[in-house]
Amino acid sequence: MMAGQLDYDPSNILVVRNLKKYFPIKGGMMNRVIGQVKAVDGVTFHLKRGTTMGLVGESGCGKTTTGRTILRLAGEKTEGDVLFNGREVYDLTKAELRAARTKMQIIFQDPFSSLSPRLPVGEIIGEAVREHNLIPQAEYEDYLDKVMDECGLQPFHKTRYPHEFSGGQRQRICIARALALNPQFVVCDEPVSALDVSIQAQIINLLKKLQEQRSLSYLFISHDLSVVEHISDSVGVMYLGSLVEYGDKKDIFAHPLHPYTQALFSAIPMPDPNARMNRIVLEGSIPSPANPPTGCKFHTRCKYCTEKCKTEPPVQKEVEKGHFVVCHLYD
Amino acid sequence: MSDHNSYEEKDTQKNDQIKTEEYSLNDDRRVRTLSPGALVIRRFLRNRVAVTGLIILAVMFVFSFIGGALTPYKEDQLFYRSDFQKKQYAGVKENTELRYVTVSKKSFPSVAQAKFVMARKKGSEGEFSVKGVNYSFKEEGDGFFTIYGDGELAAFATYDIISGSTSDTELPFELQYEIEKAVNAGGGTFELNQETYTAGEDGAVTKDGVEVAYASRYIVQPIMGDVFLTRSFKEELTSAIAEGSNEFAFTDEDGTTAEYTITHDAATESWKVMQQVETKVFDTYSSPSKAHPLGTDRNGMDMLTRLMYGGRVSLYIGFIVVFIETLLGVIMGGISGYCGGWVDNLIMRIVDIFYCIPSMPIIIILGAAMDAMRIDPQIRMIYLMLILGFLGWPGIARLVRGQILSLREQEFMTATEATGIRASRRIFRHLIPNVIPQLIVTMTMSLGSTIITEATLSFLGLGVKFPFASWGNIINDVNDTFVLMNYWFIWIPAGVCLLATVLAFNLVGDGLRDAFDPKMKR
């Protein structure tokens, strides 16, 4: 991807350009491909070093797939570029990819299924460290203790097994596993949605603390807007596999531009019972990603829908500085 | 001394440290850590039924493997018991017909014999003439007549049978006459041709201490064609008959003593001599005794020993077959599940084909083929294991494939990929350990069913063959209803062993499944 390297800005740890990931639908007599689920269908954004980008959207809009496709965990991409530190992730050889794995990590949504039930916690956290020979053998135990301590785990937890831990502790183990490799970039795939609110706060604060200590970059995937508002520096809003709006957190939360973002943000519950909610209620339901609407994907539910929206797909435009939107309203 | 003290000091210091490190009541470190394996064992041990199964299995193992080593007998050691067999040996008849011995060159035709018999009835002396020859006779002793033709000695008639000691001994008339005279007189010596003969009371005639002839009123004939009755035997026999005894013992030249019984048949005035032979016969179907706690089987082998060795064979076959099954199943299922795509498709179709094969007929046909090829029983056992193993893997392959497919989608597998752990480690450290619980359960269960299959085949005579024992071919004896009804010790112990083992394997399998799955509440 020569083009990617040409305009490489070292302050960007991650550049994603028009990323697409389609899953084939097989069926019929000969198990042929009869269609495609367009899980990720044109996502473009970039992530500055040491910052957090929140990725929001309703369930099934392709947030998780985006995260995994960036990390090359969902097989081959369909189209687009993923530049990590200026290098195309999908062009890396096997050995290079293995080395790059230490630089980019993922924290999963479900802390129960993401820990191997038959390995002690110390092994879960440290296995990859030894695998990549990141730490000399002699310092390994100390290093492990240090990482665990940073993530709020006790050294004696090393010999325990995942089933002995609560959800919050498990999520700390997941975080420790990701951070033991000393990555630069972490995809946090809804890391707190399986936890109750008090634990959510602990984990979020832990993530923030670790970010400060290690100048990590996060891609924080969530459907919880308040969490995203708390942790993110920039925010991307996804609808049906596409990134419809993306920009600085303050800009987006202060004046969302895309009609979908406006509807989404109007649904944030207010802690004040007397506050007048000005909800924008969307008509209909989210269309199938296997058969997305033509033109603007949101036109079936958009109250500003025009004829142009139905036929012509909009392109991403920078409406303000660093505030991108994909909508014909801002042409 | 000072060294000692310093050591002691160190020790006490250590103890102090340990004391200060005692955890407070609410310290997490007080909680004992149990690995998932230890938890499974704990849950398993709480399951009383499963533990019973385990104990039964342990007993079976000790019985089969240690018992087999301790038993004084071998697997195919035959036992004999001695049995007395009565064999018809000889027949004895008292001679009731007069025998005529004629002087050489003279004749005493049968017409004369008839006339003599008639004349004899009239008195002990008499005369008669035949064809112009005048005969006179005189009774010299009991059943001994001398007959003169025209005044010269022509013949003598007697009830005694005079025969030479050896078949080629020639007995001229004079000698026979002298013998008869002496014997009839109750023994004595006589001289003939300057040689001295001695006749005994029993009818034996010796010359210079060597027996040459024998006179007896009894006809002794062997009943079996290949038996030659020696003179001394005949003597013993006739004297026994003369004494009126019912049995006698006789030691032949080889020194073997046999007992004989004599039965008198009044109707035919004959005696039957039965030889009592002590023969060794296989100790078949002997009842439980001290030497054989479970008796012996139809071949005369110790039942308990056979049972132990049979258990060994059954368990061996079970384990090896399940090992082969599992090895093939894990490899095929693992490849299928991990690779996916056309490889998965191909392997699963092979599995489908294997499922379609009716295994019992195949095994029976192969067993019959091996019979026809006269394959050595030991090699046959190996073939049997291979066949059962090759027919049994598809089930395990399917299980492993399914498990791997579901595990592959688990997030911890994605996590290993994300952390860049190499494929071999991913498979062996993360995938396989999570398949093992189901695998162990299936293996335990299929151990039971394999043992049943093996027993079935052996029962049908197509599995483990003689001389090797297996619980199946031990029970095979029962295809004789008589055995079923009369010799409980042949089939009940083997049946109980089989039942207990298979049941125990199933109980343990069930227990393991429950133990591996903590959500399963009983």
Image: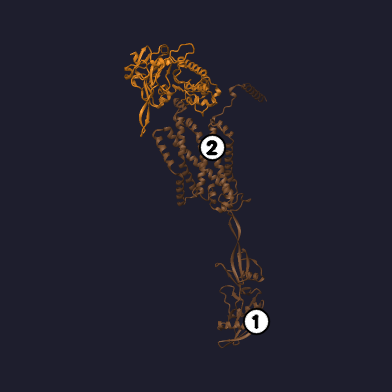
Chain colours: A orange, B brown
Q: Quadrant of residue A42?
A: top left
A132 is higher (above) or lower (below) than A255: below
Q: Which mark is residue B225?
A: none
Residue B458, position as x, y percentages in the image: 51, 48
| Place of residue A310 in the rendered image (x, y in percent of width and height, measured from the top left) | 33, 19
| Disc 1 residue type (three-letter) | Glu
Q: Quadrant of residue A7?
A: top left
Chain identity of mark 2: B
Q: Residue at x 48, y 50 (%)?
A: B376
- Dot placed on the residue nearer the N-terminal end, 1 or 2: 1
Residue nearer the viewer, B371 or A238? A238
Residue under numbered circle 1: B140
Name the residue at the bottom extreme. B132
For label 2, the SS is helix
Relative to B361, say whether B205 is above or below: below
Q: A321 or A195: nearer the eye?
A: A195
The image position of residue A264, as x and y in percent, is: 42, 16
- The vertical placement of A148 against B188, above or below, is above
Quadrant containing the C terminus of chain A in the rendered view? top left
Question: Is B451 above or below relative to B264?
Answer: above
Q: Is residue B294 visible?
A: yes
Q: Are marks 1 and 2 on the same chain?
A: yes
Q: Residues within 10 Å of mark 2 (few under 14, many from 20)?
A: many
The N terminus of chain A lies in quadrant: top left
Q: Chain of mark 1?
A: B
Mark 1 crowdedness (10 Å alpha carbons): few <14, some 14-19, many ≥20: some
Q: CA distance from mark 1 to mark 2?
A: 102 Å
Mark 2 belongs to which amino acid?
A: Gly
Residue at image mark 2: B509
- Mark nearer the viewer, 1 or 2: 2
